[in-house]
Amino acid sequence: MVGKIHALILFYFLSISCNLFAGDFEKEYYRLREKEIAKFSFELFENGEYYRAITEAKRYISILPQGKNVEEMYKLIGDSYLMAKEWIEAINAYDEILNKFPNSKYSRQIIFNKAICLIKNKKYNEAEDLFQKIISDGNEEKKNEAIMWKILLLIQQNRFEEIDKMLDDTLIKQKVTDKIDNIKQIIKEKKEASYKSPKLACLMSAIIPGSGQIYNNRYKDGIYSFILNALFILGAYKAYADENYALAGILTIFELGWYTGNIYGVVSGAYKYNKKIDEDIFKKGVSKFDLIEYEIGKTPFISIIFKFPF
């Protein structure tokens, strides 16, 4: 009887030990599994396989929604979309992490990266608001870059008085002291930029076909346009004079199409010419303000400096 009792006690303790061991084994398995997926996700990102990194990060979140690195996985998804130049998807991903982790230790970097995506998506006012949010915050992280980006966006939109007000702030002026000359240079170039008037280009082409293209500095196009319009007009006139009304009608229709298309083209060309000026000044500002390099993907696993082309 005593032997049976000892056997039962031994069996009981063995059962407890096995359960504890099984529990420890399960925890260790999930810990290693979590680390493995997270590390693999970041390796994919580091190697430029952004879409695969997104897939692995989403798998991590699905399997381990309470995992140790879940916040980093959400950030990795946004950073991967940014690096893949999927601006809208990146913005949505950054919004998601800011909603899920409002006090995230990566929040300033996320806000900054989102602002960059908004710039690439031509949403300058929204980007400016995010940079201002970083500037107004007491934290110094990314503040200098945010100040320079906001100044550049204000230059882009010809809001020079607002730049003067910014630089009247002693704290801000101290942070950009070494860039003051570059700021003044870019402002000067923007103010003195030789833009084309779409209305004037339209009027010139309406009066003398081809002159609008020449005004837009597209000299060959202007000469070709003048010659072709002249040929159509002369051809239609001669056909009417010879009473070949069918040919005259066809040539007139072609001429009207070419004439109106020419006017539309020069207006569009003037806008493109002005846009190119703005883009060139913007790119020069990015370079002069040292806004080419950014750090993203800063996590316990990686920290990447990348050059982003503007």
Image (tube, helix red, strand yellow):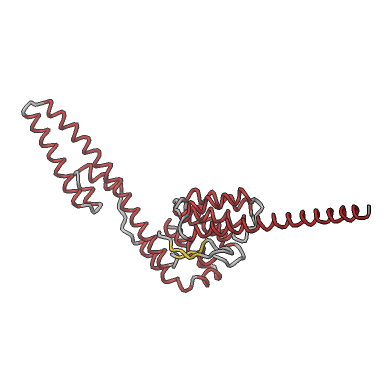
Q: Quadrant of residue 191?
A: bottom left
Q: Position of residue 8 (x, y in %)?
A: 87, 52
Image location (x, y in percent) of residue 142: 54, 65
- Looking at the rendering, which quadrant does residue 111 occupy? bottom right
141 displayed left or right of 287: right
Question: Relative to the observer, which residue lies in front, 124 or 14?
Answer: 14
Q: Position of residue 205 (x, y in %)?
A: 22, 44
> Residue most toward the left?
242
**Quick check: can you spot residue 117?**
no
Q: Find residue 22 and report its horizontal and vertical position in percent.
A: 73, 54
The answer to which quarter of the image holds residue 261 is top left
Q: Looking at the picture, does residue 53 appear above or below residue 172?
A: above
The residue drawn where x is 59% and y is 64% is: 300
Q: Residue at x 19, y 31 (%)?
A: 253
Q: Nearer the viewer, residue 16 or 197?
A: 16
Horizontal side of 228 relative to 121 (left or right) equals left
In the rendered image, which quarter contains the C terminus? bottom left
240 relative to 229, above or below: above
